[in-house]
Image (spheres, grey):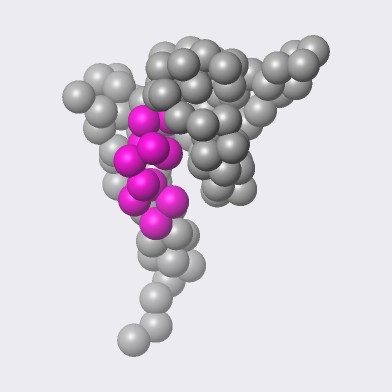
Amino acid sequence: MKHSSKQVDCAEKLKVLADETRLAVLQLLINNPRYVGEMNAILGLEQSLLSHHLQVLRRANFVVGERDGKSVLYRLAPEVEVTTGKALNLGCCVLCFE
């Protein structure tokens, strides 16, 4: 059975989001941008682990980082649509945070 490119794209997005840490990062960023140090303090992760998850989210076009001196400010990527009720419209489905 052949899958459409939209189905493949959706499956790839969902694979990225199958990790609870990456979901937590997106939930932190849904309302406003945050610095890495701020996210680290909230999530209680080692810097290297958070950096790994942010890199995965960047490659999947969920977040973008902007250098601000020695810090990096992360925000949701422009193509990520935030709906009312703190949900992300992924194009193939809607991810709701409670």
User: What secondary structure do most residues of the magenta stretch adopt?
Assistant: helix
Measuring from the top left, give residue 83's x and y in whole percent.
34, 25
Position above or below: 84 against 11? above
Measuring from the top left, give residue 51's x and y in whole percent.
59, 36
Instruction: Report whether 27 appears left or right of 56.
Output: left
As drawn, the residue found furthest toward the bottom would be: 1
What residue lies at 48% left-to-right and 67% top-to-bottom?
5
Position above or below: 12 against 78? below
What residue lies at 50% left-to-right and 22% top-to-bottom?
40
As drawn, the residue found furthest toward the right would be: 69
Q: Is residue 18 magenta?
A: yes
Measuring from the top left, give residue 45's x and y in whole percent.
46, 30
As drawn, the residue found furthest toward the front would be: 46
Q: Is residue 50 magenta?
A: no
What residue lies at 49% left-to-right and 20% top-to-bottom?
39
Measuring from the top left, give residue 2's x and y in whole percent.
39, 83
| Residues shaded magenta | 15-25
**Quarter of image, res 82:** top left
Position above or below: 76 against 12? above
Q: Is residue 43 visible?
A: yes
Query: Quick one: quadrant of the C terminus?
Result: top left
Q: Foreground: 63 or 48? A: 48
Position above or below: 77 against 20? above
What residue lies at 30% left-to-right and 46% top-to-bottom?
93
Instruction: Report whether 28 appears left or right of 62.
Output: left
Instruction: Report whether 19 appears left or right of 48.
Output: left
**Quarter of image, res 42:** top left
Query: Quick one: quadrant of the N terminus?
Result: bottom left
